[in-house]
Image: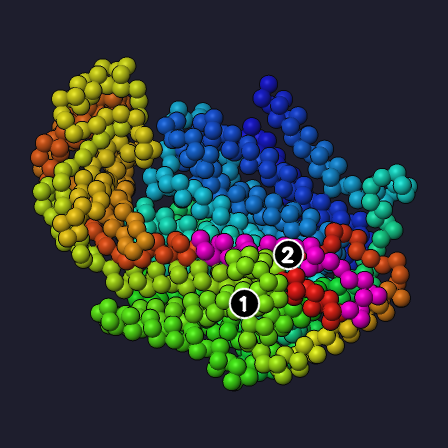
Amino acid sequence: MEALIVIILALAVLMAVIFVVSAPLRAVHRPPGVGGVRINDVQINQSTADRADLEATREAKYREIRDTELDYRTGKLSQEDYAAVDGTLRAEAVEILDRLQALERESPGAGELGPGPG
Amino acid sequence: MAALGRVCLLLALVVCAYGIGASIYGVRTGRVEWSESGRRAVYALAGILTVAFAVLEVAFLRNDFAFNTVADTSSRTTPTFYKAAAVWASQEGSLLLWAWLMSLWSSLALFLTRGRIRDVAAYATAIILGFGGFFISLMVFYAQPFAITNPAPPEGVGLDPLLRFPTMMIHPPMLYSGYTLCTIPLAFGMGALLARRVDAEWIRVIRKFAFAAWFFLGIGVLLGARWSYSELGWGGYWGWDAVENAALLPWLTGTAFLHSLMIQEKRGMLKVWNVSLVLATGTLAIMGTFLVRSGILDSIHAFGGQTLGVPFVVLIAVLIAGSIYLVVTRREMLRTEHRIDSLISREAAFLANNLVLVGLVFVILWGTYFPLISEALTGQESAVGPPWFDRYTVPLALILVLLSGIGPAIAWRRASIANARRNFVTPVAVALLTLCALLIGGVHQKPFAIAMFCCAGFVFGSIGQEFFRGVRARRAMAHEAAPVALVALVRRNRRRYGGYIVHIGIVVLFVGVAASSSFQHESELGLSPGQSSRVGAYTIRYVRATASVSPDYDSANTQGGRELSAIMRSQPGVTLGPDTAHTGATLSLGAVLDVTKHGRHVATLYPSEGFYSSEEPTQGSVGHLIGGQPVSHVALDSGVTRDVWTAIAPNIETPRLKRIVTLGDKTLPYSNPAEGMVAIAALASAYMRNPPQAQFHLIVSPLVMWIWLGGMIVVGGGLIAIWPAPSAVRRRLSVRSRARAGAGAEQGLARA
């Protein structure tokens, strides 16, 4: 009896593994709109990767601008130093936004496929 | 059911092999469905290993002694909680725990990164499955968790008494979570190099996992120190034991990485350094596992009888060689984008902090592995002890603490000398006040401890100043009450202020270490009932002896049990009954100690030593009942300002007591433990009638509790630092709001 239970459980685990692991491969052959992920239409897209990287860089730059202002307001930066650093950071932020905009013009359909950052 | 476990391991091995192939094929050909299938192989691995772990867990809970691991580490009388945790008390079970935790954490990491850095994640998946395949291969070919014996023995050996402590059962899962989490940044680091993408998105992804590894490793190390202090009979919390060091090493490199990653995020610098750190952290975690599992180095932790040394050495060699190859061949893409603008900058302070941390790593690495290298070269065993480690780590720790106060006081990019001078006035003043207070208080020995206290004062001054100025700035902008402003300030700047709280915690911990190790009063001496000893400002009097006997059978229903009960009733002071303390000891002998200070009662302590059964028939029918390794049960009175720590080693080798055991061995049959317990009861009675002098180890240590409090502050600060920011701050700005890049940042600060 125990041997039978073991066989049934082992087969159940095996079937579950095959189902889970093969799902993306099966979805390739499924028509659009039926369900599952349309993975076959989505390639590893350099533009998508660049966009994700630029968005991460942008978030980091905003954080840096905020940190710099906090440094100034807590007395770690003089007004002159703050003005210089803040100006540099804002210019860098604008450059990143320009690059994002250029990327958007080149590949208007590219976007995040997974969950958002954070 | 053991067969199900074995099938699961074999299936897991196949899944690992498939997943590695699918991931690499997918990323090399650009066929995402294969990379996705490889990712799902990790999920499947987690599912399979969950089933395998459940099979073993159920075997422990059902006392299925056909399983060798169950028979070796559990028994019918082992309490249920310890039975459940005994799964990882053996080499085989701990390997299964390692693989299972790795598969769970990896599944979570890959789930959270689905759809992002696809090429990096595909390579990372292959590497993670490679680790999984390695550990599963160890279980299939070397240390099999589902090996069985037929027919099954009727009873198990029981859990090692040293592990019968709640903290000790949580410590391995925490530590293994830390170790396994270290492999995820390693895998993503190697994946990034293979995919040639070490960029901002990679930083954002890897930071979380590196923090999680650091977090759990830190908790694991702290729990281990607490166990050492509270359970082992030597009175310390850190002995520079090889396996303790092996867990500390990846934590140190992880700490360095979390700091230097901020520099790469802001300035695009230190890419080679960061990649090297993340690869080193993962490799050190594997090396730590190697030390624990292989028994190569002598340590209380290395209880694995089988050697798994060779496979681990091969894996570590592959990791090191592969890491070096990847970093060297990708050095062009790792070229730094900027340079440090000024030596008076937070970047410079972080860099200095990194150098100190890595210096600590090299010292501890050398001291830990030196015995192995020395033995390999000379054939002679050797070891370096705590004095060697202290000589080099204490000065480095002082510099580290100082830097943790310097960094918060200076700005990113650059700070003027005048500004920096102004920012250091308060911290320096607090440090000097601390020095004055110590000198006035008569503390002028132990220069290193005094230096640590002054550095701590510096850090408290620096970080306190940060909180004060931040609240002041917030109030100036948002007109909030101070408590509200403080909460809002921390909430909107979690990374910064959470990090500051971590620094406070580390400093509190170091103050505890410095005080307890430098100003401890200790005494090891023999005392008889009525005698006392002075330890520091405390007087500890041995009031009376205690004895308890815990038979592991139902004493009421046997002839021997009834005789045992009769003897117990006739001897006041000796207790008989179930093992309510769950120590598993057959016989516990101890003492009642009265602690006073200046004539005022402070505490009553009950240290004891447990004597356990062994499975050695040669020790005799009575001797084997108490012939196992005795374990000290420490008695502790903890306070914020001091701990009073006591341990006892009762003497049961007096001629009078030995006669009882010898007589019992000669006359009582081995096969009937009930009759042997009668002799043990007689032994306990004789001990109580005329207790011989016992050896006591008495310690009064100041500020030990600060170590645990500091650890809790670090945990709290870490959680604050990693908690996701409010969604308003992370709101995406559209491309059309580029002109508001500056205004947006101002609004962000106003909200901050």
The numbered mark, 2 or 1, whose residue comes first in the sequence reads 1
Q: Which residue is mark 2?
A: B725
Q: Position of residue B301 (x, y in %)?
A: 39, 49
Q: Which amino acid type is shown beneath numbered disc 2? A: Ala
Q: Position of residue B186 (x, y in %)?
A: 60, 59
Within-10-Å neighbours for mark 1: few <14, some 14–19, many 20+: many
* Chain at tag 2: B
Which numbered circle lies on residue A81? none
Relative to B739, is B468 on the left or the right?
left
Per the picture, the main secondary structure of the magenta-coloured stretch is helix
Q: Position of residue B67 (x, y in %)?
A: 48, 31
Instruction: Tell me what residue is drawn at x 36 percent, y 28 percent.
Output: B77
Asked if one can make out residue B727 in the rendered structure from this viewpoint, the answer is: yes
User: Tell me, what colour scheme is on the image?
Assistant: rainbow
Mark 1 residue element: helix
Q: Which residue is mark 1?
A: B472
| Rendered-image quadrant of the N terminus of chain B | top right
Along the line of sight, the residue nearer the viewer: B634 or B552: B634
Instruction: Tell me what residue is drawn at x 46 percent, y 52 percent.
Output: B219
Whole-Å distance between the Cαs marked 2 and 1? Answer: 22 Å
| Rendered-image quadrant of the C terminus of chain B | bottom right
Instruction: Tell me what residue is drawn at x 38 percent, y 36 percent.
Output: B159
- Are the residues under marks 2 and 1 on the same chain? yes
Q: Which residues are magenta?
A: B712-740
